[in-house]
Amino acid sequence: MNSVINKIRSEIGNALLVAVSKTKSNEEILKCYNLGVKDFGENYVQELVSKMDSLPNDIRWHMIGHLQTNKVKDIVKRNIYLIESVDSIKLANVINKEAIKNNKIVNILIEVNIAEESSKTGCSVEELDNLINEVKNMSNINLMGLMAIGTHSENDSEIRDSFKKMKKLKDKYKLEYLSMGMSHDYKIAIEEGSNIVRIGTLIFGKRD
């Protein structure tokens, strides 16, 4: 694990490495944490909450999976570091409401379905403008950037194209973070301007 993490770090430069730890045990996460990784990404609220409650409290947890509105309160009251998967005004409103209730400012990224694939979550490019304007008016949300999953393809140029589009959107809205790139395509993502990569399989091996 150590050599893999060092290799990834050397390849991503100053970008933030988020270790995707879904289905992984606390022991595996601690092994990674003890190698200096402090950011971990989870897809499911129940699993995330369980890990937040039992692992070191200086871990910065990222919610990277689809978030249901009825689960928002469970993570907002527990110091979630970054919700990367906000894809609707309805969800943003619920996050803001819970943040106000808990006297917190919640950091978010807006997830964009840049590949326009029906199997993926995220708002459409057409909806993005409206969503950003609404979110910027919410008192207890801090919009930090955008997130996307690259086009599902064996063709690197198609993946690269989707990442290029995301970089243009990040620049257009003058946002700080662009979270894109996973185990199979993070090198392309970094080349196209990503500054957060979400890597699971390469670090932890195949999912349980």
Image (spheres, rainbow, N blue to C red):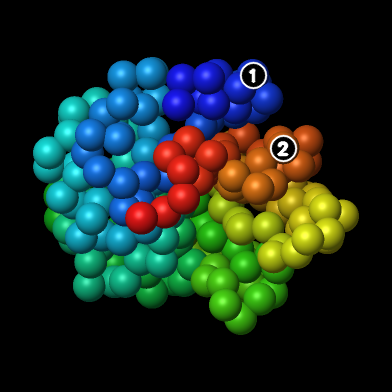
Q: Horizontal and vertical percent for residue 112?
A: 60, 63
Q: Amino acid at mark 1?
A: Ser
**Vertical comparison of 77 with 70: above or below:** above
Choose between 148 and 182: the one closer to the eye: 182
Label 1 crowd bin: few (<14), some (14–19), many (20+), radius 10 Å: few
Q: Give the structural element (helix, strand or loop) at label 2.
A: helix
Residue 59 position (above or below residue 178): above
| Left or right placement of residue 96 versus residue 155 in this view | left
Under mark 2, the amino acid is Lys
Residue 187, label in figure: 2
Check disc 1 and report the residue beneath it: 10
Q: Quadrant of the C terminus?
A: bottom left
Looking at this view, is 133 or 128 the one in front?
128
Query: Where 36 falls versus 185 (above or below)?
Result: above
Rounded to the nearest angstrom, the CA distance separating label 1 from label 2 is 11 Å
Query: Left or right of 163: which side holds 56?
Result: left
Residue visible at 62% across and 34% down?
195
Quarter of the rendering containing residue 89: bottom left
Q: Residue at x 46, y 50 (%)?
A: 206
Q: Earlier in the sequence, mark 1 or mark 2?
A: 1
39 versus 133 height, above or below: above
Instruction: Provide residue 41's location: percent of width, then percent of height.
Output: 39, 45
Residue 47 position, x and y percent, is 23, 55
